[in-house]
Amino acid sequence: MKFDIVLFLSVLILSVIGILLIYSAVVDTPLRALYLRQSAFLLLAFGSMFLISRIPLRVHDGLAYIYYIVILLMLIVVMLQRGNVHRWLVLGPIRLQPSEFSKLAMIFVLGRWLRDHIREINSFKVILGSFLIMLPPFVLVIMEPDLGSGIVFLVILFIMLLAGGARFVLILLLLNPLIAMIAAFNKIAWVAYFILLIATLIKYKTRFAMFFVTVTIAIIMGSATPYVWAKLHPYQRQRIKVFFNPTHDPFGAGYQLIQSKIAIGAGGLTGKGFMKGTQTRLQFLPAKHSDFIFAVLGEQFGFIGSIIIIFLYWVIIWRGLTIAKNSRTPFSWMVSLAIVGMLTFQVFINIAMTVGFAPITGIPLPFLSSGGSSLVVFWSAVGILMSIYSQRIEQ
């Protein structure tokens, strides 16, 4: 069994740093035992990675549709629970978040579907089929509500279609209704997307009928945005407002972002030191152990510490892309690229979120944020990359 030691050490270092950051964030709070829970999940995640790394990828290929059915059942069971928020499946003392595990299931089932239809990847049937496969778990996750994971599903779909060889313009046509609706939340974003859409259609010499239908759909879906806005949860509407204007609700929805910026700015070049961050220790920064763990990092270890963490993520992405480049089958190529893309997207969005460059979507920072399900899933994803790496070496 061959291991990519650089990939393994980078992930391990990030995970240990994550536990230290969580400890510094919760040590004086009722959640002070959270770092012990994260440590226990790290051991579980390590075991999961080691086990999965020894399973040939063809096994996941064969079980892809079974994974898909299982994850759908788990998401349905979660939705049947009482309350307004349905995200966790409680198994005794353990709480699992099926939406996190569904990301890997989605990668396998889309990889299987696209591999089986690789020669007709640019047909409308195959691209529509990919969208329809993604749709049921996407809808269930959005209803939890977990907008962040839903967005990750779309990113996985987009990356795997591109990796499979689908033309960009065809993917755009498929995602056009959704993108148009999202862009219409802001007038500037809507105009920018409309110009980009028309320019893309012209560049790819789209037929007039398709051009007309695509633009018309974009206008109709954009016009439907007020209806969608009314259907959003109040906290989701507030998050969107705060993204475009952080001072919109400085003591409510905007408080988290404002305090995050203050914490990161206060860290300066070298930071205030471990356990010495005032925003963190004096409880000014909510959700500091989870979605805003990067703000804790920035305050305590400053710009230099943040750059080191970003460098470690870059190493993981580099090793993942190298493994993808050297993969031997279309299935392993698409799966490895989807894993790297999922990781890259979550890292980018989470960090951008903490500094106000992206809306607050509840997407955790891989390996650093508290959350056992997320930690196990990303270590399992590393195990899949290790499996692909090992099989390449041994063949």
Image: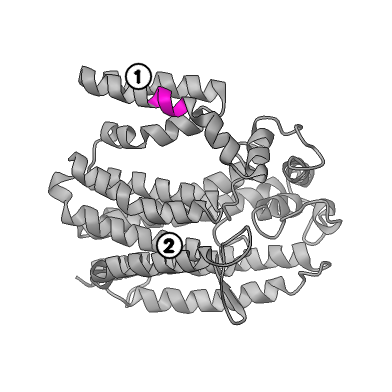
Q: Is residue 72 left or right of residue 292?
A: left
Going by the picture, which residue comes out furthest to the left? 119
Question: Which amino acid does the dot numbered 2 rest on?
Answer: Ser
Whichever of labels 2 and 1 marks the residue nearer the N terminus, that label is 2
Q: How is the image coloured?
A: one colour
**Residue 158, percent from left and from top:** 35, 44
**Residue 333, percent from left and from top:** 27, 55
Mark 2 lies on a secondary structure that is helix
The span from disc 2 to disc 1 (Cα, nearest Å) is 34 Å
Nearest the viewer among 73 and 249 is 73
List the residue tagged with mark 2.
Answer: 102
Question: Which amino acid does the dot numbered 1 rest on?
Answer: Ile
- In the figure, 190 relative to 112: above or below? above
Write the start and end of the magenta stretch as one range. Answer: 218-222
**Residue 294, percent from left and from top:** 66, 52
Quarter of the figure with residue 269 = top right
The crowding category of the residue bearing disc 2, from other C-alpha atoms within 10 Å (few below 14, some 14 to 19, many at least 20), is many
Q: Are marks 2 and 1 in contact (CB under 8 Å)?
A: no
Kindly identify the residue that appears in the image at 25 percent across and 70 percent down.
391
The dot on residue 198 is: 1
Nearest the viewer among 85 and 307 is 85
Kindly identify the residue that appears in the image at 47 percent across and 47 percent down.
151
Q: In this view, does 294 lie to the left or right of 223?
A: right
Residue 317 visible to the viewer: no
Quarter of the figure with residue 207 = top left
Quadrant, the C terminus: bottom left
Residue 44 visible to the viewer: yes
Nearest the viewer among 167 and 178 is 178
Kindly identify the residue that appears in the image at 21 percent across and 46 percent down.
126
**Residue 55, percent from left and from top:** 31, 76
The crowding category of the residue bearing disc 1, from other C-alpha atoms within 10 Å (few below 14, some 14 to 19, many at least 20), is some
